[in-house]
Amino acid sequence: MQIVLARTAWRQVLMVLVSGLAFNVSAAEFKELRNEEFRFSVNVPSDMVSCESASGGHRHGFGILLDPPGGGCDSKEPQSYIGFFGDYNVLESRSPKEAMRLLCVAKSTKSRSLHRLSLAFSGHKSAACEKDAGGGWVNVFVTAQADRWPDDPNRQPGMPYINYTAELHTTQARFAADLKTFKGMLARVSLFQVSQ
């Protein structure tokens, strides 16, 4: 009889703890990371470390560290992260699937399409792939496009102007948990289109 009561009491304590965890997760505070040049933003938990990504005078986006080392953004250690980036479509990819192929095609590595996971930028035609990055690391990429090139006689009419990429870079051991976090953040991305 005492064992049954002890199990019942333990289940009640466990249910209270789980309820508290669910409450804390749903009540998490978020911060907005915004990129004006490429017109997108994402809301991420405010306690996560984010690092800006820039090259060639452009601020392309940011990476969110999933398990930050002591050095944070300046660390040289390989680390798991989620990234959100924008680039001008200078290679003139006509679709998200075509843009994705540039990220996942490599003769020396294995890559595959991820139709089964339903990864997408909300409200935008998207494509996704997974790529073995070697050394136990894996990358997942999701691409989308927006806007049209401004009037330019050197571009084909209707050519998409901006390529968006969401990236998960993680280990095989962390893959399932980090993929869940990635999907949650991907749902919090907003793309600000100037024209359709």
Image (cartoon, grey):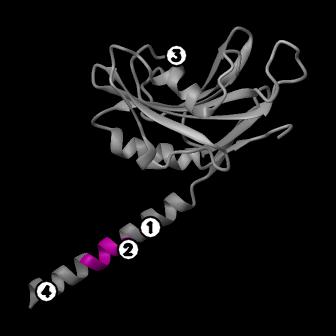
Q: Residue at x 41, y 41 (%)?
A: 178
Q: Residue at x 38, y 74 (%)?
A: 16
Q: Is residue 36 left or right of residue 136?
A: right
Which corner quadrant holds the C terminus?
top right
Residue lying at the far front in this picture: please name it.
156
Mark number displayed over residue 107: none
Type of the residue with mark 2: Val
Which residue is labeled 2 in the image?
Answer: 16
Dots 4, 2 in contact, CB < 8 A: no
| Lower position in the chain sequence, tag 3 or tag 2 | 2
Q: Does the segment drawn in magenta span residue 13?
A: yes
Residue that mark 3 sits on = 74
| Residue 61: x %, y % from top left | 65, 26
Separation of residues labelled 3 and 2 (CA atoms): 40 Å
Q: In the picture, residue 76 is in which quadrant?
A: top left
Give the CA separation, mark 3 to mark 4: 54 Å
Mark 3–mark 1 Cα distance, whole angstroms, equals 35 Å
Residue type at tag 3 = Asp
Residue 94 image position (x, y, % from top left): 67, 27
Q: Earlier in the sequence, mark 1 or mark 4?
A: 4
State the residue position of label 1. Answer: 20
Circle 1: residue type: Gly
Q: Which residue is mark 4?
A: 4
